[in-house]
Amino acid sequence: MFDIRHRVGISAPTDRVYELVATRSGLAEFWATQVEGDAAVGGKLAFYFNGPKPSAVMEVVELSPSHRVQWRCIDGPAEWVATTVRFDFTATDAETVLLFTHAGWREPVEFMHHCSTKWATFLLGLKSGLEGGAFTAHPNDTRISSSWG
């Protein structure tokens, strides 16, 4: 199995970073402006990127306040189904360290490379928004390819 991994230091309190990743309203600020569903453990979140059908549906697997958010993809691109997405938070004296992992890719296909870059742009948008700049949730995200957005 293959994983996408990123580390971002964010000058914001850990509970605020966690809130943006763990709630529908927060996810709509930094990842996709249209999010539907239940953000509680066992709930399902549908993320809309292009069109009337959700682009991805995640089951919320774990919510550990100010420490971890974890999902399991149950619908979306074939390469994503059965993968897990995890956000781990650690407070330091200077910042909140966010360790991001999109784990369980069956093979490192070209779409995985694309998704790695896209996740990085969304995580940097999260950092920007929390540090006084702009959030970059879809559809206001950085377009990195004519193929997949």
Image (tube, rainbow, N blue to C red):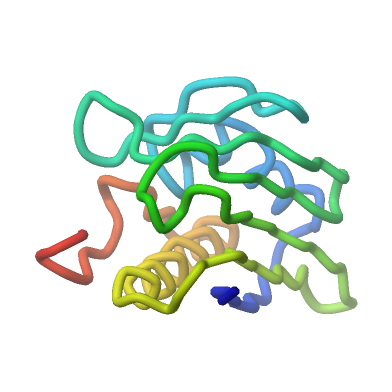
Seen at 54% across and 21% down, the residue is: 37
Residue at screen point 38% across, 49% down: 137
Q: Viewed as shown, does residue 60 lie left or right of 113?
A: right
Residue found at the very far left of the displayed protein: 146
Residue 46 at x, y percent in the picture: 46, 30
Residue under the image location 41 percent in, 56 percent down: 134
Q: Position of residue 121 (x, y in %)?
A: 40, 68
Decide: is 27 above or below 17.
above
Residue 85: x and y in percent read 62, 55
Q: Nearer the viewer, residue 53 or 68?
A: 53
**Residue 66 left/right relative to 12:** right
Nearest the viewer among 68 and 83 is: 83
Q: Is residue 111 above or below residue 87?
A: below
Quadrant holding the C terminus: bottom left
Q: Quadrant of the N terminus?
A: bottom right
Give me the residue at 29% from left, 41% from top.
49
Q: Report how many numbered discs are placed on residues in the image.
A: 0
Closer to the camera, 145 or 106? 106
Compared with residue 51, is residue 90 higher up or lower down, i.e. above or below? below
Residue 90: x, y in percent?
Answer: 85, 68
**Nearer the observer, 123 or 53:** 53
